[in-house]
């Protein structure tokens, strides 16, 4: 069952780049969210590409969702909250809340 969930996450994440590009173009030139501007890491506003530049945040993410490492190049422009609906349950609300709690400790 876990293999099926991982395969579903992989399939869902492959579709992510197109959505990320659309969203990035739509927000081109827009002001950054306050959380991103202040340096606070947020599952809602911090792009994954920025999140993984912080070694402690990256470690927390990879501990919670080890399979995500294979998709960093494809989902780097997206936030974890944007990836969650495409993850087929691998990144659910509970996991997002737990990750945010870890990020808040940093």
Image (cartoon, rainbow, N blue to C red):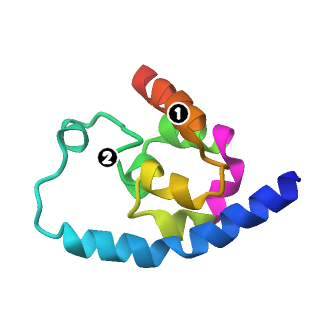
Q: Residue at x 59, y 36 (%)?
A: 95
Mark 2 or mark 1: whose residue is earlier in sequence: 2
- Label 2 and label 1: CA atoms lie apart by 13 Å
Residue 35 placement (x, y as % from top left): 24, 37
Q: Residue at x 42, y 47 (%)?
A: 51
The residue pinned by badge 2 equals: 45
Q: Which residue lies most toward the top here?
A: 105
Tell me the SS state at disc 1.
helix
Classify mark 1: residues with Cα within 10 Å, few (<14), some (14-19) or many (20+).
Answer: many
Inspect the magenta stretch and tell me whether residue 105 lies in it: no
Q: Quadrant of residue 76?
A: bottom left
Label 2 close to label 1 by CB (< 8 Å): no
Residue 25 placement (x, y as % from top left): 23, 75
Classify mark 2: residues with Cα within 10 Å, few (<14), some (14-19) or many (20+).
Answer: some
Q: Residue at x 48, y 24 (%)?
A: 101
Tell me the SS state at disc 2.
loop
The residue pinned by badge 1 equals: 99
Relative horizontal placement of residue 103, taking residue 62 as reference (left or right)? left
Task: Identify whether 23 is placed above or below 65.
Answer: below
Relative horizontal placement of residue 25, taking residue 87 as reference (left or right)? left
Residue 53 seen: no
Task: Identify whether 27 is placed above or below 87.
Answer: below
Q: Which residues are magenta?
A: 63-70
């Amino acid at each position: 069952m876990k293999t099926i969930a991982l395969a579903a996450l992989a399939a869902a994440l492959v579709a992510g780049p197109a959505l990320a590009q659309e969203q990035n173009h739509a927000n081109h030139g827009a002001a950054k969210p306050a959380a991103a501007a202040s340096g606070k890491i947020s599952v809602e506003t911090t792009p994954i590409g920025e999140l993984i530049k912080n070694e402690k945040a990256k470690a927390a993410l990879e501990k919670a969702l080890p399979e995500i490492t294979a998709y960093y190049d494809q989902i780097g422009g997206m936030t974890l909250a944007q990836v969650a609906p495409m993850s087929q349950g691998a990144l659910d609300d509970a996991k997002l809340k737990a990750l945010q709690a870890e990020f808040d400790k940093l």
